[in-house]
Amino acid sequence: GQKSRGPRTSKGKANSSRNARRHGVLASSVVLDGESYPRFHALLSSLQEELQPVTGIESSLVENMAVARWRLIRLWSLEKAGFSMEIAKQDLANEQFLGERDPTIRTALAFRGLVDQTRTLDVLNRYEIRFERQYDRALFRLMAFREKRDFAKRTQEV
């Protein structure tokens, strides 16, 4: 029974009752039209369940992690869409060879087109690194914050 059973104090219950509103505001700031609010909430809930934030600072850091991860997932979707669009463009330009090319060759041509004629992949890569760092930084700060809090609690008990 070490898993959280929810808030027990009236203050904790009051804070918990505001979670849905706070998460709704967060989602409306992060989730774009056409993206899934329930999937964002599932991501955030999963991180909260695993990391079990206790304080407001911890909750904010977990939210930062969810936002960074969401943006990273979005980038992967953008990369896929970019390849799909470039493959379609290459297919139109090389219609006479369409039946003779396997998917790997079509993807290679699309890759070459994205690299040679646009900066799409460079920009996506830069943002991917940025969002991974944001996620890692928030996780590191969460762990450091907890370590300080636990250390302070242990020294008070002695």
Image (tube, rainbow, N blue to C red):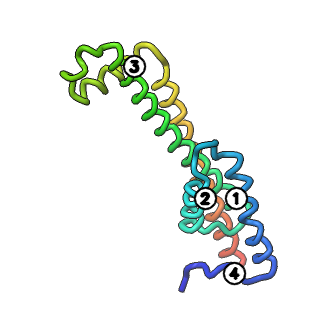
Query: Disc 4 vs disc 1: Cβ atoms closer than 8 Å?
Result: no
Mark 2 to mark 3: distance in Å? Answer: 36 Å
Q: Dot 4 surroundings within 10 Å: few (below 14), some, or many (20 or more)?
A: few
Q: Earlier in the sequence, mark 1 or mark 3?
A: 1
- Amino acid type at image mark 2: His
Q: Tell me if I can see residue 158 in this picture.
A: yes
- Amino acid type at image mark 1: His
Residue 90 occupies quadrant = top left
Mark 3 to mark 4: distance in Å? Answer: 68 Å
Please, is residue 157 above or below residue 125 in the view? below
SS state under label 2: helix
In the drawing, does residue 98 fall left or right of residue 26?
left
Q: On residue 41, which mark appears?
A: 2
- x 70%, y 52%: residue: 26
Residue pointed to by mark 1: 23
Residue pointed to by mark 3: 89
| Percent x, y of residue 12 | 76, 76
Residue pointed to by mark 4: 157
Query: Disc 1 vs disc 3: Cβ atoms closer than 8 Å?
Result: no
Front disc: 1 or 3: 3
- x 59%, y 43%: residue: 34
- Amino acid type at image mark 4: Glu
SS state under label 4: helix
Front disc: 2 or 4: 2
Mark 4 to mark 1: distance in Å? Answer: 35 Å
Mark 2 to mark 4: distance in Å? Answer: 38 Å
Q: Earlier in the sequence, mark 1 or mark 2?
A: 1
Q: Tell me if I can see residue 143 in this picture.
A: no
- Amino acid type at image mark 3: Lys
Residue that lies at the very extreme toward the left in this rendered image = 100
